[in-house]
Amino acid sequence: IAGITQAPTSQILAAGRRMTLRCTQDMRHNAMYWYRQDLGLGLRLIHYSNTAGTTGKGEVPDGYSVSRANTDDFPLTLASAVPSQTSVYFCASSQGLLNKQFFGPGTRLTVL
Amino acid sequence: DQQVKQNSPSLSVQEGRISILNCDYTNSMFDYFLWYKKYPAEGPTFLISISSIKDKNEDGRFTVFLNKSAKHLSLHIVPSQPGDSAVYFCAATPTSGTYKYIFGTGTRLKVLA
C-alpha cells in the first residue's frame, strides 16, 4: 500500500441499505477527512478526524457516521442510504492542519 | 452560503500562454489557502499553498497571489501546457485547529495545443 486506498471503487446501492466506505492510509498521518464531490458544488467536507479516537462534523454530516479506531483507518458509514447520497466520495489525510492533504482515488456511489 | 467561490466554471488557454484561475472567499478567519488539481477519475493532488502572512508563493510554473484586503487569491500558470488541463480547486482554512478545509466549486482549465 502506498498513500491512501479506498474501497470499493464503485457501488450501486438500493435506497435504505447500509453501506460502509473504507479508507486506509499508510503515511501515519494524524488527520483524515471524508469529502463528497458533486457537480457544481465542488468538494464538501462530511466528517474529519484530528487524531485517532476523535472525530468531528464537517459541512454536510447528516446521514453519515465515521469512526477512527486507529491511525490508519477511517471508514464512512451510510446507515440508510438515500438517492441524494449519490456522489463521488474522497478520503484524504494530512500530517497536521497546515499541511497538504493527500487524497484517495475516490468511490463512486449510486443510490437507487 | 458558499464561503469559497470560484466564479469561472471553465477556462480555455492557448499552450504557452498564461492561465489565471481566480478564487474569492468571504470568511475573514481563513488564513491558509491551497490549490489542488484534479484529473478525471482521480483524487485531487496538491499544487501549491500560501499563508496569509505572505502575498505571493511560487513553485516552478505555478504562482499563487493573495490579496487579503480583497479576500481574493489567484493561481498563475506560466507557461501553460496541455498536461495542465484539469479541474483546479482552491481551498481555505483558518489556522485555529479546526481541520475544516472549505473548497471552492472548481474551475476546469483546458490548455489548447
Image: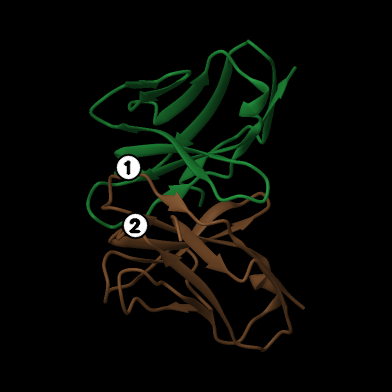
Chain colours: A brown, B green
* Residue A98 location (% of width, % of height): 28, 45
Q: Chain of mark 2?
A: A
* Residue A2 location (% of width, % of height): 44, 56
* Residue A108 location (% of width, % of height): 67, 64
> In the visual, does B15 lie left or right of A89?
right
Tag 2, which secondary structure?
Answer: loop
Three-letter amino acid code at the position of disc 1: Phe
Please state which of the two labelled residues, at mark 1 or mark 2, is closer to the viewer: 2
Q: Nearest the camera: B35 or A105? A: A105
Q: Chain of mark 1?
A: B
Quarter where residue B59 is shown: top left
Q: Nearest the camera: B16 or B71? A: B16
Which residue is pictured at 37% across the width and 25% down the height?
Answer: B66
- Judging by the rendered image, the residue that carries numbered circle 2 is A27
User: How dense is the environment of label 1, judged by Cα within 10 Å: few (below 14), some, or many (20 and up)?
Assistant: many
Q: Which mark is drawn over residue A90?
A: none
Q: Which mark is drawn over residue B30?
A: 1
Three-letter amino acid code at the position of disc 2: Met
Which residue is pictured at 67% across the width and 71% down the height?
Answer: A84
Quarter where residue B54 is shown: top left
Answer yes or no: are tags 1 and 2 on the same subunit: no
Which residue is pictured at 64% across the width and 35% down the height?
Answer: B86
User: From the viewer's perspective, is residue A20 above or below residue B70?
Assistant: below
The residue sitting at the front extreme is A1
Which residue is pictured at 50% across the width and 66% down the height?
Answer: A60
Q: Label 1 to label 2, Cα distance in Å?
A: 27 Å
* Residue B70 location (% of width, % of height): 39, 26
